[in-house]
Amino acid sequence: MKKQQRSTQLTYPLRKKIVLRHAQACITSLGRIIHAPLASLLTIAVIGIALSLPIGLLMLLHNTNQLTKNWNDNTQISLYLKSSITEQQATTLMNQLRVNKDIANVNYISPNQGLEQFEKQTNIGSILSQLPNNPIPGVIEITPTVQLNSPQLIQPLINQLKQLPQVSQAQLDMQWVKRLFNVVEFVSRALYAIGILLALGVLLIIGNTMRLTLQQAQHEIKVLQLLGATKSFIRRPFLYTGMLYGIFGGILAWIIVDIVLAWLNTPIRNLLLSYQNSYTPHGLPIGLVLLLLISSGLLGIIASRITVSHHLRKN
């Protein structure tokens, strides 16, 4: 029991000492960055610009996913019925379609209603009304369920509806949907490729900056080695320096992307409104911002550790 109390008493001062050493190393690193403002700002600017491109693509991908998440809410399958189908037969068909688990809503437009809509939208509706028979067929509008949120999933439903004996044609304009999903997939893959390349670029930028910093601190490192300082003690402030460079660069990238989004927000909204879409683009959510700062900080630590370890092995 006494041994456990002693170990607990020794552990707390040791933990406190470790925390103080890390705090001291962090403050020393921040002071090193502040004392060379021009060089530090240039390094942070280069890191921020390098990170802003993948972050901008990530924000574009995030907004596109939000925009297309409920794309099927405005997507309808139009079933053009055969001219011989009566309204009673159309009603029977609608009741059968409502049982289908892939169909969320069914709406029937009679030939007369279709003719009225056609007259309102065009200038030749009056000519059609003078014909002996109404040439416009009855139409059943089908809204797919939320689960059918991609062209690949909704295509089997269309093929199934085309086989119905009452249906003359089943139509869905999926060309724009397919193109949109192809663009999203392309941007996703491009994001990973560009992100990896620019991450390597950030490693090289921070690594080169730390190499110059080590050359300037060469005499300080020699004195610490003569005093018996361990490699981890010597390495620690430089690791914090790299981490701070990465975090500050990530913050700058976040600011750049938000400024660009604010600049483009009005034309993007006008473009979406022209397609009857009131969606407003959003900046990066807080979760992705935290991921950005953590990732950029880790890149700084990795670059600094590689550079400092190589320097200490040579000396």
Image (cartoon, rainbow, N blue to C red):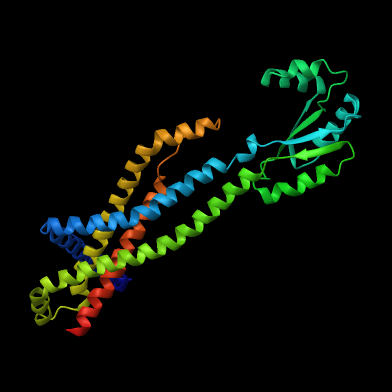
Of the pair 266 and 34, the residue shown nearer to us: 266
**Percent x, y of residue 179:** 59, 48
In the rendered view, tell whether residue 186 sits above or below residue 123. Answer: below
Whether residue 255 sits left or right of residue 116 in the image: it is left
Q: Is residue 123 visible?
A: yes
Of the pair 233 and 64, the residue shown nearer to us: 64
Quadrant, the N terminus = bottom left
Quarter of the figure with residue 164: top right
**Percent x, y of residue 75:** 66, 37
Q: How many marks?
A: 0
Q: Can residue 5 be seen in this view?
A: no
Whether residue 167 sits left or right of residue 78 in the image: it is right
Look at 32% across and 71% down and name the residue there.
4
Of the pair 277 and 304, the residue shown nearer to us: 277
Of the pair 86 and 282, the residue shown nearer to us: 86
Look at 67% across and 48% down and name the residue there.
151
Look at 48% across and 34% down and name the residue there.
271
Look at 24% across and 54% down and name the residue there.
45
In the rendered view, tell whether residue 81 sits above or below residue 198. Answer: above
In the rendered view, tell whether residue 253 sits above or below residue 198. Answer: above
Quadrant, the C terminus = bottom left
**Percent x, y of residue 217:** 11, 72
**Percent x, y of residue 51:** 34, 56
In the rendered view, tell whether residue 161 sits above or below residue 266. Answer: below
Whether residue 72 sits left or right of residue 167 in the image: it is left
Quarter of the figure with residue 295: bottom left
Q: Outermost residue, bottom direction?
A: 314
